[in-house]
Amino acid sequence: MGKRWGFIVALLCCFVSTTAHAAVIEGVRSYRAPDYTRIVFDLSEQVEHQVFSLENPRRLVIDLSNASLATELSVLDLSETPITNIRSASRNQNDTRVVLDLNAQVRPRSFLLSENQQYGERLVIDLYDTGASVQSERIVTASAADVDNNKRDIVVAISAGHGGEDPGAIGVGGIQEKQIVLAISREIERILNQMPGYRPVMIRNDDYYVDLRGRTTIAHQHNADFFIAIHADAFSSSRARGATVYALSQRGATSEQARRLAEKENGADLIGGVGSVSLSDKDEVLASVLLDLSMTASIASSLEAGDKIIASLSSVAHMRRTNVEQAAFMVLKQADIPSLLIESGYVTNASDARNLSSPAYQQQFAAAVVRGITSYFYETPPRGTLVAWHKINGGGPASYVVSRGDNLSDIAERFNVSLASLKAANNISGSVIHVGQELIIPNGLTAPVLAQLTFREHVVSRGESLSQIAEDYAIPLQRIRDSNQLRNDVIRIGQVLRIPSS
Ligand SMILES: [Zn+2]
C-alpha cells in the first residue's frame, strides 16, 4: 500500500471511530450530601469508564473510553466538597480523562444510571468522606436535631429466605437452605436483642413462607432502618463455596454470577430485572423518577453497609467475593431502606454445608453480620436514635477496620480510649496491626456484647489435650486457659471450651 493510501485509511479510521462510537459528555452536576459528594456526568450513550486514586498530590482520575467532552466543567459548585479543582484532557485521541484535585481522603464509588424521564444515560461518581473534620460536622448537625429523650432503637429487619413449601437450595446430606438461613437469622436476632440501641424484627420466625411483597410490607410496618435477607447458595459443581454479599442494582448485574443468581431464584425471592417490575398503573412515569432518585441513595447506603459486613465476615467465613455484588433482587427492592442480601455459603459444598449446619459457626457468622451492621450505623446513625446520641456523647463504635496508614495510638486517640485498653480488648501485645484487621473498640456501645462473641466453641473429644487444642487453633495455651478460667490443664470429654479468636 502506498503512502497516500495509508494516510486515507488512517483518516477513515478516525472518522469511523469518532462518529459511530464516541459518547459525548453533555453535562455535569454535583451534589453535596452530609457524608459524600456526588458528581454526575450526562452522557449521549453508555461509556466504559475507570476510576482510580493517585497521591502526591491527592487526586481522583476518571477515564472515559471513547468519549469527548462537550460541556464546561468549571460550572460545578465545589464549595464544601473535598474537590479543589476539576480539569480534563483528551487521551489516546478518543478518550477523555477527568481529574478531580482533592484536599481530603475519599472513598470513590462509580456506577452508570440508564435514562429516565428527566435525564439520559449517566455516569455517577460518589466520593465518600473518610476524614475526621467532616465527621465532627455531622455530629454537630445530629446534636442540634436530637432531643434528649428521643433515643429510639435502630430497627433491623431480618429476612430469612424461603420457608414452608419453598425449601430453597438443597445441599449435601439433604440440608435445606430454609432451615440454615432461619437458624442464622435467629442468631442475628438474638445478638441484636442484646445490643443497646438496636431492635431486630424477624420477617419470618419459623418454617413458613412469606411472599415478597409481604416481606417488604413487614419491614415498612416496623419502620425498619435496615433490611437484610439471608440466603444460602447451591451450584452444580460442589467446588463452589464461600459467602457473597449482594446489593440491589439499578440496572444490570455487576457479574455473570450475580446475574445468574438473580435469574435462578426467580420463582422465590428474586425476580430477573428491575425493568420487569411494574411500579404502579397510574403514575408510572413519576414513580420511576422518584424511585430512581430514592433508590440510588439507598443503593449507595447499602453498598457502604455491605463493605462493613464483608470486612467483619472475612474473619469468620470464606468469602467468594470481597466486593459487594449487585443484582436485581426483588426482595431488596426497598425504595427507602438500605438493603442487602447475604448468600451465607454453598449448601452444595461439603465444607460450607458442615459450617452452615453448625450452631457455633452460625453464631460466629451472625455475630460478624451484626458487627458489620453496627459499624455501619455508628458511622451514619439515623437521627433521634440511641446510637446517634451515644456517638454525640463520646461513645466509640463497636469495632473498627484498620485502613492503610493507621496505627494503634492514632486509633485509640480517635475513639477516645486508652492505648492499653484498646490493646487488651484485642489481645495485642506489641503494636503490629495490619490493613483490614478488625479491632474491637472497648468503649463502644455494643463492644461488651461483641467481645463475648469473638469466641468459638470447641467440644473436647477423646484423647485431646489442652495444649494440642491450642495448637490446632493456633492460639497461645495461656489464652485458652484465661478464656475458660482454667486453674489447671485437666479437661474432660464433652467439655465445651471457649476458643478466643486468633
Ligand atoms: Zn435463597
Image (cartoon, helix red, strand yellow):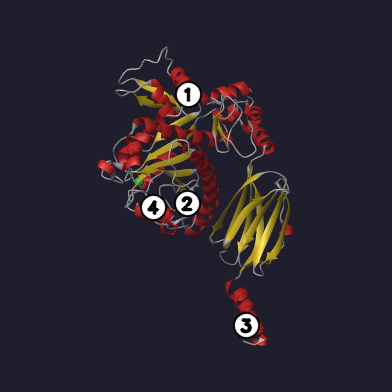
Q: Which residue is mark 2?
A: 326
Label 2 near label 3: C-beta < 8 Å? no
The residue under label 4 is which amino acid type?
Leu
Vertical arrangement, residue 189 with respect to residue 211, above or below: above
| In this view, the mark in front (4 or 1) | 1
Residue 145 in the image: state x and y as whole percent. 63, 33
Foreground disc of the pair 3, 4: 3
- Residue under label 1: 476
- Which mark is first along the chain, 2 or 4? 4
Precedes in sequence: disc 3 or disc 4: 3
C-alpha distance separating marks 3 and 1: 72 Å
State which tag comes first along the sequence, 3 or 2.
3
Q: Amino acid at mark 2?
A: Gln
**Image depth: mark 3 or mark 1 in front:** 1
Q: Are there few (<14), some (14-19), or many (20+) residues within 10 Å of tag 1?
A: some
Which residue matches tag 4? Answer: 261
Q: CA distance from mark 1 to mark 2?
A: 41 Å
Sequence-wise first label, 1 or 2: 2
Q: Secondary structure at mark 3?
A: helix
